[in-house]
Image: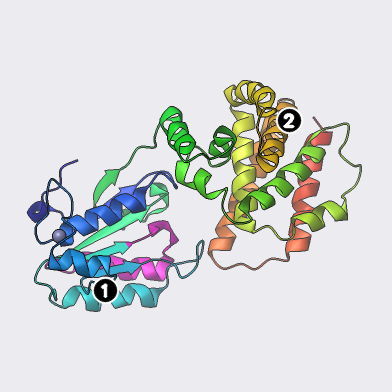
């Protein structure tokens, strides 16, 4: 893509699925725009501006993102931007703001951003990033040049993950909704342990012959350390896979091949996923859709700062799932 340094629009809105590298792209673009002698569409890495940036002290580059992942971008953070925009550039070049995810602006901070977009920005370029374009206010969208970024194909994503030697890349890629960066992060920290707990419980519940008659408190307890965001994301991806038949054929083939895997965690995860998808063939599609709406609503409430009783919530969700399984 060609973006001439002197012809960049005042505000760009990068959109695309989460985990495909939009932030990496936005950062490179910002670095290029700040560079005093860019070479072949890239920052030179050597000029005064690049050196400041590499040291993390560039005065003309500003980030505006939630304090914690999944939380809202606050109005005070957006208000700070207008001061930054009004100042003249300290290095004599452009100033760049990186802001996102735009859908995580609450109504007040979105209105504050709108004001910044309406005012003359001089030498400032705003690079906005969104994972959910439909979640961005139309008035914000209409003031930006849209730049949709496509997701990589499954083959390309798999090849990249395999180069990084990520075990069971195809299962993780499915649970991440085809987003390679999310799939890669799944093997870090205790993420995979949590995922294993999630899948093993859900696998037991998804088989009509092994699902208990009544809610099982010990199962719910095992899910308590999981974050609501992870729980809802994984569950939504599984339901999406169940509802798209093609995924099930693929996962059955995968279960056979997974036996050769050496990684104990991902071995049980990919087998568990395959069994859930297999059992899911008989689930009532309408109930699955209804349940997935419930999970989406939960996700929204989390964004607006809800703090539900995790124990009650998990028991309720498990019971919903048991009912879907038992009535199939
Ligand atoms: Zn440079």
- Image spot of residue 300 (x, y percent): 55, 57
In the rendered image, which quarter contains the C terminus?
top right
Q: Which residues are magenta?
A: 99-123
Along the polypeptide, which appears first: circle 2 or circle 1?
A: 1
**For residue 115: magenta?**
yes
Vertical side of 93 occupied by 194: above or below: above
Q: Residue at x 73, y 30 (%)?
A: 275
Residue 147 visible in the picture: yes
What kind of secondary structure does the magenta stretch mostly adopt?
helix
**Residue sitting nearer the eye, 252 or 262:** 262
Residue holding disc 1: 57
**Residues at marks 2 and 1, CA–CA distance in whole angstroms:** 51 Å
**For residue 309: magenta?**
no
Residue holding disc 2: 275
Q: Which mark is residue 157?
A: none
* Crowd rating for badge 2 (residues with CA inside 10 Å; few <14, some 14–19, many 20+): many
Q: Residue furthest front?
A: 262
Q: Quadrant of residue 97?
A: bottom left
* Crowd rating for badge 1 (residues with CA inside 10 Å; few <14, some 14–19, many 20+): few
Q: Residue at x 19, y 63 (%)?
A: 50
In the rendered image, which quarter contains the N terminus?
top left
Vertical side of 158 occupied by 104: above or below: below
Secondary element at image label 1: loop
Residue 121 visible in the picture: no
- Image spot of residue 26 (x, y percent): 29, 54
Secondary element at image label 2: helix
Left or right for 75, reference 225:
left
Q: Quadrant of residue 299?
A: bottom right
Left or right for 53, reference 184:
left
**Residue sitting nearer the eye, 321 or 255:** 255
Left or right for 93, reference 98:
left
Ligand 1 closer than 8 Å to the CB at disc 1? no
């Amino acid at each position: 893509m060609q973006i001439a340094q002197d012809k960049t629009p005042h505000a760009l809105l990068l959109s695309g699925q989460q985990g495909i590298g939009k932030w990496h792209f936005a950062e490179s673009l910002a670095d290029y725009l700040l560079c005093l002698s860019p070479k072949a569409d890239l920052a030179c890495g050597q000029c005064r501006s690049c050196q400041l940036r590499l040291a993390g002290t560039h005065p003309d580059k500003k980030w505006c993102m939630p304090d914690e992942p999944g939380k809202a971008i606050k109005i005070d953070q957006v208000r700070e931007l207008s001061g930054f925009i009004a100042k003249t550039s300290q290095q004599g070049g452009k100033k760049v703001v990186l802001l996102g995810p735009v859908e995580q602006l609450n109504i007040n901070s979105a209105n504050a951003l709108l004001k910044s977009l309406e005012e003359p920005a001089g030498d400032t370029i705003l690079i906005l990033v969104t994972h959910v374009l439909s979640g961005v206010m139309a008035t914000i969208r209409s003031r930006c040049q849209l730049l949709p970024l496509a997701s990589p194909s499954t083959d390309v994503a798999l090849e990249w993950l395999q180069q990084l030697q990520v075990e069971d890349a195809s299962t993780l890629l499915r649970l991440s909704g085809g987003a390679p960066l999310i799939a890669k992060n799944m093997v870090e920290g205790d993420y995979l342990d949590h995922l294993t707990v999630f899948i093993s419980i859900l696998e037991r519940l998804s088989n009509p012959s092994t699902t208990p008659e009544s809610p099982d408190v010990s199962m719910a307890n095992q899910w308590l350390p999981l974050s609501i965001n992870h729980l809802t994301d994984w569950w939504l991806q599984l339901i999406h896979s169940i509802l798209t038949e093609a995924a099930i054929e693929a996962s059955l083939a995968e279960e056979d091949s997974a036996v050769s895997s050496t990684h104990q965690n991902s071995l049980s995860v990919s087998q568990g996923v395959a069994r859930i998808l297999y059992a899911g063939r008989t689930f009532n599609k309408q109930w699955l859709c209804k349940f997935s709406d419930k999970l989406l609503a939960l996700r929204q409430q989390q964004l607006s700062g809800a703090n539900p009783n995790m124990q009650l919530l998990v028991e309720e969700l498990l019971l919903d799932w048991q009912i879907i399984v038992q009535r199939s």
